[in-house]
């Protein structure tokens, strides 16, 4: 029980952050961190497998939604596309399992895998820096984000920028000094309190806003043929 509470507490800020990386509202990170895990508990058979939200899948989903599809982050179209991507990703994964394609994973070299992970990390960081700076644009690629950072540097919201830098420093430092304390959750609580008591939204600091209660209603996505083709191709890439 204690372990479950600790993991859940750490999952909340991470899930909300990964949702924004994927181009979705923060609340969808909470949906994705709860329902799939519950399904895994019911249907899966391995007690050792680590299951949960993932930076790689979030970044790839974000690149498809924001880059390839050209949709606005958090838009209704982006919200409609994300579950279809997940559906086709699952279909392809089942197909890969039936064909036993997992045996080819052993041929992926360590340098290639390390390069992929490093490149993905840099891409995520570059995409989040404009948000830390309080800029309205974030870019959908490394170079577009780089252009926004340098081109709009003096338009930054310095309160937002200072809070972001201090948060990163605290999390990285405390992870090494006091690793048993969940600093990601601590800074989330402190940041929320600061935004509430100091009315930071009045200083143009972006806040998450009201989180909807409950779950969204079920509905079939209204897509055209081109959108379905994009979802199928994107699902294959995610898989």
Image: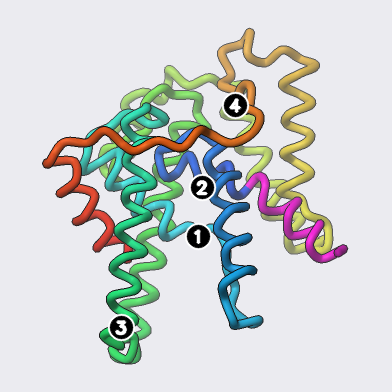
Real-space Cα separation, disc 3 to disc 4, in angstroms: 42 Å
Q: Residue at x 40, y 55 (%)?
A: 122
- Which labelled disc corresponds to residue 54? 1
Q: Which residue is mark 3?
A: 98
Task: Where is residue 187? Give x, y as percent.
Answer: 74, 40
- Which labelled disc corresponds to residue 208? 4
Tell me: residue 29, above or below residue 181. Answer: above
Task: Identify the secondary structure beneath mark 3.
Answer: helix
Q: Are marks 1 and 2 in contact (CB under 8 Å)?
A: yes
Position of 44 with respect to 106 (left or right) is right
Position of 145 with respect to 40 (left or right) is left
Residue range (magenta) = 1-13
Tell me: residue 13, above or below residue 70. Answer: below
- Which labelled disc corresponds to residue 194? none
Foreground tag (3 vs 4): 3
Which sits earlier in the primary sequence, circle 2 or circle 3? 2
Query: Could you say which is closer to the camera, residue 206 or residue 165?
Result: 206
Q: Is most of the magenta stretch helix, strand or loop? A: helix
Q: Residues within 10 Å of mark 1 (few under 14, many from 20)?
A: few
């Amino acid at each position: 029980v204690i372990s479950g509470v600790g993991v859940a507490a750490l999952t909340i800020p991470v899930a909300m952050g990964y949702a924004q990386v994927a181009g979705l509202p923060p609340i969808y990170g909470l949906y994705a961190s709860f329902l799939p895990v519950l399904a895994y508990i019911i249907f899966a058979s391995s007690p050792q497998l680590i299951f949960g939200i993932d930076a790689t899948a979030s970044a790839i989903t974000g690149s498809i939604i924001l880059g390839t599809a050209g949709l606005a982050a958090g838009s209704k179209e982006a919200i409609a596309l994300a579950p279809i991507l997940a559906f086709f990703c699952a279909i392809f994964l089942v197909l890969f399992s039936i064909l036993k394609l997992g045996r080819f994973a052993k041929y992926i070299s360590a340098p290639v895998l390390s390069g992929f992970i490093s490149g993905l990390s840099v891409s995520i960081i570059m995409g989040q820096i404009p948000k830390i700076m309080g800029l309205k644009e974030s870019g959908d690629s490394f170079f577009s984000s780089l252009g926004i950072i340098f081109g709009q540097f003096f338009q930054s919201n310095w309160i937002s920028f200072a809070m972001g830098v201090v948060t990163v420093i605290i999390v990285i430092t405390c992870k090494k000094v006091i690793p048993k304390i969940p600093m990601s959750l601590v800074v989330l609580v402190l940041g929320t309190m600061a935004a509430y008591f100091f009315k930071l939204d009045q200083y143009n600091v972006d806040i998450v806003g009201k989180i909807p209660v409950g779950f969204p209603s079920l509905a079939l996505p209204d897509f055209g043929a081109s959108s379905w083709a994009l979802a199928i191709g994107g699902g294959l890439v995610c898989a």
